[in-house]
């Protein structure tokens, strides 16, 4: 139905951000395949939202740069749409008007199509305050998709939803991503959500990418799959261990070393059997 | 005791409409009775019937309409000018920090002057003509509209403004789609407040110097000891004040259809009808 958009190629080079004397991001180097789905997990306050804001161009980097399809990013990232945790819909506009906000030309038909896709066709003329939290996030999703973005930045979009609605929304996001082919970056607290959706899970610790895990479990992924459980468990363990200041955990790597290196590419094969290296810590 | 019976929806609605009038009606009857038996001397407070009679007479000669018209015109003109200025400066200072730094503290200083304290100065400036009264109304209306507009804009969720930016809205579109509708509930509070102030200032203004208007009618009646006309004028002011308040409420209903408060009101009234 929709022409698959080409996901954009995103890179960061030595991306750092400080607020006053407090450095929040430390020289992040990333390169994301066009059309890939990447999840960023980490403890509260480790800089996940800050990273997304830099990628969307909402905030300028302190040093380093974001490179979109080979071009350094200046100002707002026009290729990107960001979907916020709180939805950020306008209560004084109807569901349909919210979806079409900022779109030029004749958008109503397309907006209705998207609402149908997220299962809200008959709510088009309702006010936002008449919707449940999950329905609001569906509207936010339709709204983010209407311009066919090549980069979708999702900042804990499902954080406030109950477990059942979350699973439904995850499936919806996966379907739309497969259909439209955008590059997606999902920030989440929920490791299982990251493993369900992402090809690659980045673990952010105090502003550094501490782990870079490849996830090639076959889609659609099931939680009861042994590979799924193992991968989730291992990612969770590493996050928790680090947080407790475990003596065995190595010092934080220097910024320049957080670059993705070959060992980090290891992961699981499509049948849930563990590969040689599970999670590789990018430390000296 | 009807409340104990399960009332039919139709009767419940009728009751809702009629009940608020019960107490005023009782008081009016009591007043009429007391005046008729002479407990209240006519010179102090004439009977409601006498006031009605005075109203009918004045309406028949056309005098009532003339006074009513000029009062409404003054209130309307003063309100329009004052409220527009308040809105413009409220929006300007709300979205433009430089303008706020330049103007806001001056406005805050001027705000502390009660408009009525300016009357002698206003008469010196404008004489006792129309401008003096319109100016007074303007000044009184400006501040509530300005302040509420300004704070309404400042109170908008910054997340929504940021969302507008990410979704590619131009500055003009952010103002019309995000800032103004977001500040609208607060602006309307300012307008309702301002309408009340407009009438108060007008009453005073018309009693100081005028040759028409309801205030003038009351002042004139005092000269001739026409208590009935004086009370009529007071009641007319009450009526006009109530009318403008209803107007403001209607405006709220029209401009804030999305607001949960207004939707709840709409829903609760429809709940009374059996069809829903
Ligand atoms: N505008 C700002 N000014 C100052 N400090 C900020 C600002 N924004 C974020 N920070 C700080 O940067 C750090 C990272 O914040 P960020 O919002 O990126 O965390 P997060 O990983 O998204 O956390 P959460 O999971 O709780 O959303 C925090 O310590 C926060 O206090
Ligand atoms: Mg965050």
Image (spheres, grey):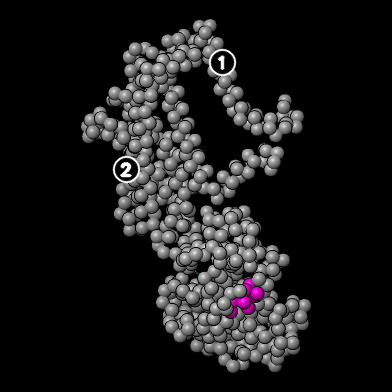
Neighbour tally class for label 2: few under 14, some 14-19, many 20 plus, Cα within 10 Å = few
- Quadrant containing the N terminus of chain A is bottom right
Magenta stretch: includes residue A90: no
Q: Is residue A7 left or right of residue A278?
A: left
- Quadrant containing the C terminus of chain A is bottom right
Position of residue A224 relative to residue B114, above or below, is below
User: At numbered mark 2, what does the secondary structure look like: helix, strand or loop?
Assistant: helix
Q: State the CA–CA distance, disc 2 to disc 1.
A: 47 Å
Q: Main secondary structure of the magenta part?
A: helix
Relative depth, front residue between A29 and A3: A3
The answer to whether marks 2 and 1 mark residues whose Cβ atoms lie closer than 8 Å is no
Position of residue A214 relative to residue A180, above or below, is below
Q: Which residues are magenta?
A: A173-181
Name the residue that disc number 1 marks.
B29
- Please tell me which of labels 2 and 1 falls first in the chain: 1
Name the residue that disc number 2 marks.
B110
Q: Position of residue B83 (x, y in %)?
A: 37, 43
Q: Position of residue A234 (x, y in %)?
A: 69, 82
Position of residue A267 relative to residue B127, above or below, is below
Residue B239 visible: yes
Neighbour tally class for label 1: few under 14, some 14-19, many 20 plus, Cα within 10 Å = some
Q: Position of residue B103 (x, y in %)?
A: 31, 51
Which chain is indicated by disc 2?
B
Position of residue B254 relative to residue B35, above or below, is below
């Amino acid at each position: 139905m929709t022409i698959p958009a080409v996901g954009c190629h995103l890179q960061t080079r030595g991306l750092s951000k400080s607020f006053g004397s407090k450095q929040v991001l430390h020289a992040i180097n990333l390169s994301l395949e066009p059309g890939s789905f990447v999840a960023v997990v980490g403890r509260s306050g480790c800089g996940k939202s800050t990273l997304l804001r830099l990628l969307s161009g909402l905030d300028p980097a302190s040093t380093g740069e974001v490179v979109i399809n080979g071009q350094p990013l200046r100002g707002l990232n026009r290729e990107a749409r960001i979907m916020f945790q709180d939805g950020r819909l306008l209560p004084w506009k109807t569901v349909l008007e919210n979806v079409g906000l900022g779109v030029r030309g004749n958008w109503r038909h397309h907006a209705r199509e998207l609402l149908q896709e997220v299962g809200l066709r008959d709510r088009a003329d309702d006010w936002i305050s008449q919707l449940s939290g999950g329905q609001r996030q569906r509207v936010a999703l339709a709204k983010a998709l209407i311009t066919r973005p090549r980069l979708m930045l999702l900042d804990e979009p499902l954080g406030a939803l109950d477990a059942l609605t979350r699973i439904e929304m995850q499936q919806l996001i996966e379907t739309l991503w497969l259909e439209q082919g955008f590059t997606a970056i999902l920030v989440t607290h929920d490791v299982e959500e990251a493993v369900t959706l992402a090809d690659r899970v980045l673990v952010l610790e105090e502003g550094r990418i501490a782990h870079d895990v490849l996830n090639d479990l076959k889609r659609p992924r099931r939680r009861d799959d042994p590979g799924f459980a193992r991968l989730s468990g291992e990612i969770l363990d590493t996050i928790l261990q680090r947080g407790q200041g475990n003596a065995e955990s190595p010092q934080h790597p220097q910024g320049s070393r957080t670059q993705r290196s070959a060992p980090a590419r290891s992961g699981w094969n499509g049948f849930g059997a563990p590969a040689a290296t599970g999670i590789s810590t990018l430390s000296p | 005791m009807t409340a104990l019976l399960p009332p039919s929806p139709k009767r419940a609605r009728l009751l809702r409409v009629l009940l608020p009038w019960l107490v005023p009606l009782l008081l009016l009857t009591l007043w009429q009775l007391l005046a008729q038996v002479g407990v209240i001397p006519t010179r102090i407070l004439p009977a409601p019937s006498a006031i009605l009679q005075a109203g009918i007479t004045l309406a028949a000669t056309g005098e009532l309409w003339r006074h009513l018209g000029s009062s409404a015109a003054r209130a309307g003109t003063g309100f329009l000018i004052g409220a527009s200025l308040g809105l413009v400066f409220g929006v300007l200072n709300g979205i433009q920090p430089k303008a706020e730094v330049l103007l806001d503290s001056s406005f805050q200083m001027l705000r502390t002057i009660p408009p009525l304290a300016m009357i002698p100065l206003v008469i010196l400036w404008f004489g006792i003509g129309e401008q003096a009264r319109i100016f007074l109304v303007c000044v009184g209306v400006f501040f509530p509209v300005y302040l509420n507009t300004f704070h309404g804009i400042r109170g908008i969720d910054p997340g929504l403004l940021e969302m507008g930016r990410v979704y590619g809205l131009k500055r003009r579109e952010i103002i019309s789609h995000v800032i103004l509708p977001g500040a609208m509930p607060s602006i309307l509070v300012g307008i309702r407040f301002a309408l009340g102030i407009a009438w108060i200032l007008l009453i005073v203004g018309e009693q100081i110097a005028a040759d028409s208007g309801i205030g003038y009618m009351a002042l004139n009646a005092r000269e001739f000891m026409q208590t009935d006309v004086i009370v009529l004028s007071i009641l007319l002011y009450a009526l006009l004040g109530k009318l403008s308040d209803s107007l403001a409420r209607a405006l709220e209903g029209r401009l804030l259809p999305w607001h949960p408060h207004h939707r709840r009101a709409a829903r609760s009234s429809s709940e009374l009808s059996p069809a829903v």
